[in-house]
């Protein structure tokens, strides 16, 4: 029967996506860009909306929440998955509100008046059935997909506003967003880029060779030389894995050192991050923040005799507090870190922060 | 103090204006003093005399001047050339005789309130020294972008029959004034075997330096001193030559060769100055065997005092700073810091160590092996994980390559980063350094004087792929492999030396005290 086939097909896709997420997270495998993950998640959610069985918005949201919990559990460090799920949930709420006729703004805003007057929870609000809801939601998700595809270009278009000629720019590791940003500026301006290689994975090397293809003067330095060369750097432009709710970053390890060195020399630190990286999590120094990979990258097995007597650590991420960041450049423009909480409230509904 | 006073400044302090007769009297006094010491010291003494006579009385020529300084006095021009190569020695002699003169004057002026005046005037006394136009020769190894300097060096090396090493690879423009050598082309390739001019143990030492087999400030200095002992052993004075002068001339090509292999470190520079001084202090009546024995004893005592005993003293001070339950962070492989930690462990202190390491040298693994062999509990991370590990740390111990006169610490690249992040987390930073590594240079950033290591070291192969393999062919790509960096003194909380525990800003005080003692 077509319905059953669709269901099995859907669950197969979900399972394959989950297993890919689990595999990708080891850090040593082919690291997929966050943009790709975001796109695939959104496509999958669109498929779920289209093919799953649901009667009203509430049921749809329940299904998406359930799948979302499984996806985030598969790879907790991949926050774009969770972000996309929350975006879609917000889309559903908006479409529902629009179908009902009430404006979304008044519904979403928490106000003292609302707290006092509306005693009823919004739960039973989602029980109404609308025929066009499915089509509307799918259309909105398509819009989201087009937005996702255009993020890198939107960010690179702002490059010339921030880079002047004969500048020395420093970056760390490999970020596709920053790569596109710098390449776009290089078409019109001449500047020099210093890339910190970011051991132990040394992704900086890939970044440097890729930048050289566009004839950008690049220098590769080891991580230890970051403070030594910082005095000659005019700007630091980095990418990040996640932007946290307080405006801080969860970025590749070594970024905190880079940010401190930039602060010491009063060099502006610019973070190029598309909006889908914005996550409603707050930083917590417990075990959930850090992700570790196998320390054989740090201390290889060839050092056999001391290996058993030594603890070796290989954390993947660093926390960078918002005081060290000067500017966020995202697809909707430039923002200060203090504004991030506001952007977040526009993207996600407060009740979705916990899936 | 006021040990640098002369008659002139004492008179100045008393408010009298110097008349012509007094100036002449002064000059005569100085000549008398010099005549008394002429027998002991060598010819450079006359050169100083000439300097003193030429400079007007109130100011004191403290520093060696190159030959071009005006010298109306008699024929000592030749001495100046010879003396120009031994600045520290004549400086030391200058100070010695100043001290003697001051002593004699002090005894002759009893009852006057000189103590206060002396100490007060020691400062203004010092400044006339530094205000003299000191034309210090810029070391060659930071003038690579100057073709005239390169030509001069090439000529000098040709004269000494030392091979010239050529630079390798594309140099980042910020560092075009420094050499960049490749480990694959050692300077010994161009020497014929057996080398005629250069002693074979020097050749071996140079090769060990250039290949990185001997690395680390103390190790290099000790190896250098042992090799010099060997050289002195094999040396025989040619006829009609004095040992004190000829041996120093013999050492010059060796030193050029070694600096071609790898630029000399501050500690090596100080050791060489000491040896040269000792050699020139050998009296001419001394027999060759006796002189050689004396020199070898000097070298042994230098190593013993400045390196071995110093590290014992430093360990004693440092162990006071290590308490039970400490988590100590160390960076790279510093022989002194490792020694301190081993000693503290022997004294039954309970602590654990975090070793931070960095590419491409990965020296921390050596430190890790030594500490683990002792039985100390260790953790190992790379420098990019510093922000993760630092909240656990209670103290940071760092070694130093040299301590500069403005309080900056010159050490392995990455040290300043560690000090910066430790400061941000309010963790105390202690630098351990022997006094023989103190140097009179000043530097504010890591660019003007540094060392560039082989850029090929940055290439790494992961998963069978190596992205930077053909970096030479890519036009706009440069690799930068710095060896040293400078840490500003506000990141360092304490410097532990064999003279005690001092703040970073007291380095010039120690230098002054040391120079007086010499």
Image: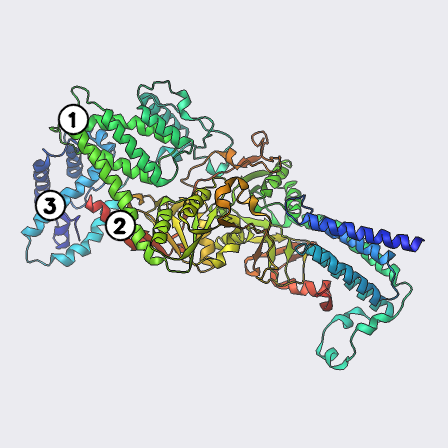
Q: Chain of mark 3?
A: B
Local packing at callout 3 (Cα closer than 10 Å; few below 14, some 14-19, many 20+) is some
Q: Confirm or deny contact between disc 1 and disc 2 (CB under 8 A).
A: no
B309 or A265: nearer the eye? B309
Q: Chain of mark 1?
A: B
Q: From the image, tell me which residue sits under label 3.
A: B101
- The image shows residue B238 at horizontal and vertical percentages of 19, 20
B20 or B382: nearer the eye? B382
- Asked whether the viewer can see residue B423, the reply is yes
Q: Is residue A96 left or right of residue B183?
A: right
State which quarter of the image contains the C terminus of chain A.
bottom right
N-term mark: 1 or 3: 3
Task: Report the number of numbered marks.
Answer: 3
N-term mark: 3 or 2: 3
Which mark is drawn over residue B510? 2
| 1 vs 3, front mark | 1
């Amino acid at each position: 029967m077509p319905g059953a086939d669709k269901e099995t097909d859907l669950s197969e896709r979900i399972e394959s996506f989950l297993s890919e997420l689990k595999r990708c997270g080891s850090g040593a495998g082919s690291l997929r860009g966050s943009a790709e993950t975001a796109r695939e998640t959104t496509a999958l959610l669109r498929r779920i909306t289209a093919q799953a069985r649901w009667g009203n918005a509430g049921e749809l949201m329940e299904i998406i929440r359930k799948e979302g919990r499984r996806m985030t559990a598969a790879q907790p460090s991949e926050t774009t998955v969770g972000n996309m799920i929350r975006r879609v949930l917000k889309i559903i709420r908006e479409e529902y509100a629009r179908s009902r006729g009430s404006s979304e703004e008044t519904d979403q805003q928490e106000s003292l008046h609302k707290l006092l007057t509306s005693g009823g929870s919004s739960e039973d609000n989602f029980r109404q059935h609308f025929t066009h809801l499915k089509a509307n939601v799918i259309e909105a998700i398509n819009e989201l997909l087009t937005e996702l595809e255009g993020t890198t270009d939107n960010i690179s278009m702002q490059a010339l506003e921030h880079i002047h000629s004969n500048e020395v720019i420093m970056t760390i590791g490999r970020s596709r967003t920053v790569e596109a940003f710098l390449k776009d500026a290089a078409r019109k301006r001449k500047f020099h880029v210093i890339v910190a290689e970011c051991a132990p994975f040394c992704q900086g090397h890939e970044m440097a060779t890729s930048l050289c293809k566009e004839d950008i003067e690049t220098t590769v330095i080891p991580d230890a030389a970051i403070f030594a060369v910082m005095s000659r750097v005019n700007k630091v432009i980095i990418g990040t894995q996640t932007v946290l709710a307080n405006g801080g970053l969860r970025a590749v390890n070594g970024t905190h050192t880079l940010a401190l060195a930039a602060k010491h020399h009063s060099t502006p630190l610019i973070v190029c991050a598309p909006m889908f990286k914005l996550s409603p999590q707050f930083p917590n120094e417990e075990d959930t923040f850090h992700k570790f990979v196998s320390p054989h990258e740090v201390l290889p097995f060839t050092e056999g005799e001391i290996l058993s007597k030594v603890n070796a650590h290989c954390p993947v991420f660093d926390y960078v507090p918002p005081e060290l960041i000067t500017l966020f450049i995202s697809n909707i423009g430039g923002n200060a870190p203090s504004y991030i909480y506001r952007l977040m409230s526009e993207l996600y509904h407060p009740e979705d922060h916990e899936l | 103090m006021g040990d640098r006073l002369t008659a002139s400044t004492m008179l100045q302090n008393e408010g009298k204006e110097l008349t012509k007769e007094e100036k002449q009297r002064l000059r005569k006094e100085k000549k008398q003093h010099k005549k008394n010491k002429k027998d002991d010291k060598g010819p450079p003494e006359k050169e100083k005399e000439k300097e003193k006579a030429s400079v007007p009385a109130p100011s004191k020529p403290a520093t060696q001047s190159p030959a071009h300084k005006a010298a109306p006095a008699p024929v000592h021009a030749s001495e100046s050339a010879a003396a120009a190569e031994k600045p520290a020695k004549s400086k030391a002699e200058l100070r010695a005789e100043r001290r003697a003169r001051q002593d004699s004057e002090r005894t002759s002026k009893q009852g006057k309130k000189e103590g206060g005046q002396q100490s007060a005037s020691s400062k203004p006394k010092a400044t006339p020294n530094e205000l003299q136009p000191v034309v210090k020769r810029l070391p060659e190894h930071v003038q690579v972008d100057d073709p005239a300097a390169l030509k001069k060096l090439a000529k000098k090396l040709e004269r000494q029959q030392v091979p010239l090493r050529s630079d390798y690879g594309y140099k980042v423009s910020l560092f075009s004034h420094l050499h960049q050598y490749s480990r694959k082309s050692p300077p010994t390739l161009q020497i014929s075997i057996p080398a005629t001019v250069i002693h074979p143990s020097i050749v071996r030492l140079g090769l060990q330096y250039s290949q990185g087999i001997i690395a680390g400030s103390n190790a290099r200095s000790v190896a250098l001193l042992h090799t010099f002992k060997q050289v002195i052993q094999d040396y025989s004075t040619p006829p009609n030559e004095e040992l004190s002068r000829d041996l120093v001339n013999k050492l010059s090509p060796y030193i050029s060769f070694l600096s071609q292999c790898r630029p000399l470190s501050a500690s090596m520079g100080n050791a060489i100055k000491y040896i040269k001084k000792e050699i020139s202090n050998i009296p001419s009546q001394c027999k060759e065997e006796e002189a050689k024995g004396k020199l070898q004893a000097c070298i042994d005592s230098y190593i013993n005092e400045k390196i071995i005993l110093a590290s014992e003293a430093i360990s004693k001070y440092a162990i006071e700073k290590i308490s039970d339950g400490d988590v100590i962070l160390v960076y790279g492989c510093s022989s002194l810091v490792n020694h301190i930690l081993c000693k503290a462990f022997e004294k039954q202190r309970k602590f654990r160590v975090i070793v931070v390491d960095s590419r491409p040298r990965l020296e921390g693994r050596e430190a890790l092996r030594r500490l683990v062999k002792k039985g100390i509990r260790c953790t190992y991370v790379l420098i990019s994980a510093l922000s993760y590990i630092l909240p656990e740390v209670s103290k940071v111990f760092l070694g130093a390559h040299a301590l500069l006169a403005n309080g900056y610490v010159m050490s392995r690249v990455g040290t300043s980063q560690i000090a910066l992040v430790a400061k941000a987390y309010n963790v105390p930073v202690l630098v351990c350094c022997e006094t023989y590594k103190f140097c009179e240079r000043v530097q504010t950033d890591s660019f003007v004087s540094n060392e560039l290591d082989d850029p090929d070291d940055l290439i790494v192969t992961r998963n069978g792929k190596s992205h930077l393999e053909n970096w030479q062919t890519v036009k706009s790509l440069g690799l930068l492999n710095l060896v040293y960096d400078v840490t500003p003194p506000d990141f360092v909380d304490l410097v532990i030396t064999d003279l005690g525990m001092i703040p970073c800003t007291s380095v010039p005080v120690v230098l002054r005290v040391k120079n007086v003692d010499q």
